[in-house]
């Protein structure tokens, strides 16, 4: 798989407080973490509030301190409580076995289990593809299954009747190893005139209608608002977005959601929206669209996803890329052939290659717990 690392997300340092233990014993020693399990120990990485995923490279380096005949270490990539792990790599005294969901995709003789032998197991997920490496050798690769969510979940270690020493753990954001195209705005395709008459003529609202001002719309929480004009890429969508606290959620701001290239392939999108009982997210999961949830889940994460099915492409949880109160953001959404981008205040936060791009559709906004004020909305042809 051809890719390059663009940003270190965490690692490689091992800190005991980053891991949650059930059933075994954890002992920090010399910058490593020793796991002692007479029966079964479940050790889960918990250093950020929402499980990772997206276009990432996750690597774990370890060695066996003790491994008996019936002992094993299972590395769960994408472990979730209510679903099968996305990927499992199982080490025992005889074999290393790799599972994609519940399907075995590789088995071979186990690597050395001697104390002095350290091993690195690595999962790479990029767009719809995956690859599993052991000591820099690719053991398994293929395509994830629709809706391509096996890359979401926590990193978990299941240790059965063994002692294992964790030496390092890293997660990096990656992109396809290609040259991303530069672009510039050319023809102005649309400029929002704002006002009540313009909204009624140009928009469809699922949920409570927005507050309309002369130069802005304040979209109400629990609403989805989509412009009636359809666009074919490559385009750039510019706007100024201001999250607004509400009486129901007065403690902060959350979930400023930007949507582009939304469509309904087997019918009329706006008839579909008008027939929905509410603006619940589950109503929109079957539709093709790109969407960024800036400051989502009570302002814990910023994520880029692609529907159908919530395929996660990129996630941030650092404070600098979450929402601030009483602040406006200059947002740009880009569809440029196989490339999609998300810009904030003139900086490209996300740039990703999509092998199956959404090239035509509508533009919209979703407000969840907080309201969202949109002004200066323009849509450009780009070259």
Image (tube, rainbow, N blue to C red):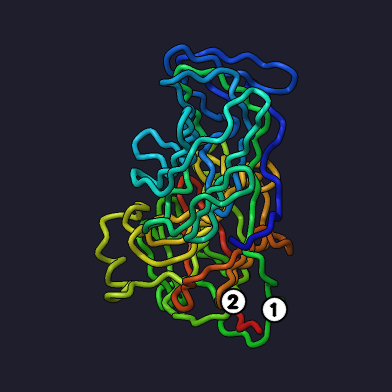
Image point (64%, 51%), residue name: 173
Residue 72 visible within the image: yes
Give the position of the C terminus as an image quadrant: bottom right
> Vertical placement of 58 versus 214: above or below?
above
- Mark 2, secondary structure of its residue: strand
The quarter of the displayed image where residue 273 is located = bottom left
Percent position of residue 244, x then y: 56, 49
Closest to the observer, 212 or 11: 11
Q: Are marks 2 and 1 in contact (CB under 8 Å)?
A: yes
Q: How many marks?
A: 2
Q: Which residue lies furthest to the bottom in this view?
A: 187
> Vertical placement of 354 versus 112: above or below?
below
Percent position of residue 298, x then y: 52, 39
Image point (58%, 15%), residue name: 26
Residue occupied by mark 2: 336
Residue occupied by mark 1: 183
Image point (56%, 30%), residue name: 45
Closest to the observer, 349 or 179: 179
- Mark 1, secondary structure of its residue: loop
The quarter of the displayed image where residue 167 is located = top right
Image point (61%, 25%), residue name: 114
Sequence-earlier tag: 2 or 1: 1
Give the Cα separation between the discs numbered 2 and 1.
8 Å
């Amino acid at each position: 798989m051809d890719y390059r690392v663009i940003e270190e997300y965490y690692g490689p340092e091992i800190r005991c407080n980053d891991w949650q233990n059930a059933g075994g014993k954890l002992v920090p020693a010399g910058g490593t973490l020793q796991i002692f399990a007479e029966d079964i120990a479940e050790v889960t990485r918990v250093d950020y509030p929402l499980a990772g995923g997206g276009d990432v490279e996750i690597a774990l380096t370890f060695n066996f301190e003790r491994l008996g005949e019936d002992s094993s270490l299972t590395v769960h990539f994408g472990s979730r409580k209510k679903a099968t792990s996305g990927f499992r790599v199982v080490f025992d005294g005889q074999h290393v076995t790799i599972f994609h969901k519940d399907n075995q995709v590789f088995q071979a003789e186990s690597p050395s289990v001697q104390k002095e032998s350290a091993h690195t197991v690595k999962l790479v997920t990029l767009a719809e593809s995956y690859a599993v490496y052991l000591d820099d050798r690719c053991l398994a690769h293929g395509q994830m299954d629709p809706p391509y969510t096996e890359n979401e979940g926590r990193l978990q270690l299941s240790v059965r009747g063994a002692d294992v020493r964790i030496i390092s753990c890293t997660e990096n954001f990656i992109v396809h190893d290609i040259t991303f195209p530069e672009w510039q705005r050319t023809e102005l395709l649309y400029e929002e005139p704002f006002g009540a008459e313009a909204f009624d003529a140009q928009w469809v609202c699922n949920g409570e209608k927005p507050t309309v001002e002369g130069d802005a719309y304040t979209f109400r929480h629990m609403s989805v608002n989509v412009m009636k004009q359809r666009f074919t890429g490559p385009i750039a969508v510019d706007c100024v977005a201001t999250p607004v606290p509400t009486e129901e959620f007065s403690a902060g701001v959350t979930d400023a959601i930007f949507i582009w290239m939304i469509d309904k392939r087997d019918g009329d999108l706006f008839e579909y929206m008008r027939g929905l009982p509410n603006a619940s997210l589950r109503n929109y999961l079957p539709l093709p669209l790109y969407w960024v949830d800036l400051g989502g889940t009570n302002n814990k994460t910023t994520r880029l996803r692609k529907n159908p099915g919530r395929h996660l492409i990129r996630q941030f949880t650092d404070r600098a890329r979450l929402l601030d109160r009483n602040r406006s953001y200059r947002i740009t959404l880009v569809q440029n052939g196989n490339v999609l981008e998300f810009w904030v205040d003139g900086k490209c936060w996300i740039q990703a290659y999509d092998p199956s791009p959404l090239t035509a559709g509508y533009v919209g906004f979703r407000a969840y717990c907080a309201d969202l004020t949109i002004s200066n909305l323009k849509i450009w042809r780009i070259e």
